[in-house]
Image: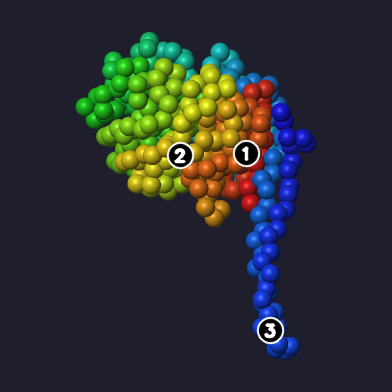
Amino acid sequence: MPIENRVVPMLLLAAAGACASAGVSEDVPETPSVVVTLAPELEPQTSGTDALLQAVSAVDARVVWVSGHAGMFARTLDGGATWRAERVADADSLQFRDVHAASAEVAWLLSAGPGALSRIYRTSDGGRSWTEQYRASEPEAFLDCFAFWDAERGVAFGDAVGGVPYVLVTGDAGATWERVPSDHLPAALPGEGSFAASGTCVATAAERLAWIGTGNAAIARVLRTVDGGRHWTAADTEVASGEAAGFASVAFRDSLHGAALGGEIGRAGARGDYVAVTTDGGRRWTLGGRPTFAGAVYGAAYARGLGAQPLVAVGPGGASLSRDDGRSWTPLDTLAYWSVGFASPESGWLVGPGGRIVKLRLR
């Protein structure tokens, strides 16, 4: 299944011939137009752990944080040439399914699980110590993911409690997390929540926009806020839905263009309509193309800054690349991944089981 050697440099050239004016010997032929496309390059890196890694946050091309099971997190300060993996003290039983880093020193971890296992931690000293900022008090609560607009303002999402979507917001770097009032949210559908698969079920943009992909209900929806998380609306989609189906990831390249991705979680060989796309900021959604790998999409991210801004989707079945906002896809890999994140098109990281970290370069 793996691509041999895991490093895939390739140069594809297409040249159009020039047309010189006939019978005029002194004419200089036009310079042929040449289009150069470099294939993606995948480089395995050594994480220092064999724990399942489920989330990645790239600050820049050198500083990257990842997180996973058994209380694990890892950090690199040199673009992944070396990683240092550690456990949060007294957190061996926690599954850190999301991480957000603001710098080499400041980062947050979100653990998923029922009730008190759903927590948020923050470090300001590069992971040497962690402060618990939030612990769910409702037994039925289950945090799935979070995202930040900046180093002070963030939003977290979890499975519905009491018929209300579980949305938390902070405006003080997580020192306090407050639940959004029920009258500022659409009512939850029966069973509705999301999937703590990759730390990408929430996406933020600009200063006040955010989107949440939901699942496990009769309709897979995307929740949207335009005021920094204080009020939310919901848009229906036509992707696969129902029990253990729906969205696991949302990605936006700007305030208007984005994709919501997911599928039938746990059905490894399943194929279906698992991608929805929007061009109006999430007000309306249409079906996108099908990624090249079978099974659900767990995580997705845009590589901003390269032409059409490629979108990468990953899951246990592999990894795929789209250069048209999720409408068509080409294969990247066949190894299992849970999440993906980018600092730039040439600095992306895919993470997955067994401590897997692969650096991805798109050119």
- Which sits in the foreground, 6 or 348? 6
From the viewer's perspective, tell me whether residue 98 is left or right of residue 12. Answer: left
Residue drawn at point x = 35 percent, y = 21 percent = 218
Q: Earlier in the sequence, mark 1 or mark 3?
A: 3
Residue 175 image point, x, y percent? 40, 29
Mark positioned earlier in the residue sequence (3 or 2) = 3
What's the CA distance linking mark 2 and mark 1? 16 Å
Which SS class for mark 2? loop
Residue 19 sits above or below residue 305 on the image:
below
Amino acid beneath label 3: Ala
Q: Looking at the image, do the residues carrying marks 3 and 2 touch, with CB atoms under 8 Å apart?
A: no
Q: Which mark is residue 22?
A: 3
Any part of residue 162 in sight: yes
Mark pair 1, 3: CA separation: 45 Å
Could you say where residue 172 lies in the image, as x and y percent from the top left?
Answer: 38, 35
Q: Amino acid at mark 2?
A: Gly
Q: Which residue is mark 2?
A: 288
Which residue, as the protein is rendered here, is positioned at the far front?
A: 23
Badges 1 and 3: C-beta atoms under 8 Å apart? no
Which quarter of the image is occupied by the N terminus?
top right
Q: In the drawing, does residue 168 fall left or right of residue 44?
A: left
Q: CA distance from mark 3 to mark 2?
A: 48 Å
Residue 59 visible? no
Q: How is the model colour-coded?
A: rainbow
Residue type beneath disc 1? Pro
Q: Quarter of the image holding residue 87?
A: top right
Q: Determine contact: label 2, label 1, CB under 8 Å.
A: no
- Is residue 87 depicted above or below 5 in this figure? above
**Which residue is at the far top?**
139
Residue in the foreground of this view, choosing between 268 and 256: 268
Mark 3 is surrounded, within 10 Å at the Cα level, by few (under 14), some (14 to 19) or many (20 or more) other residues, namely few
Identify the residue under disc 1: 331
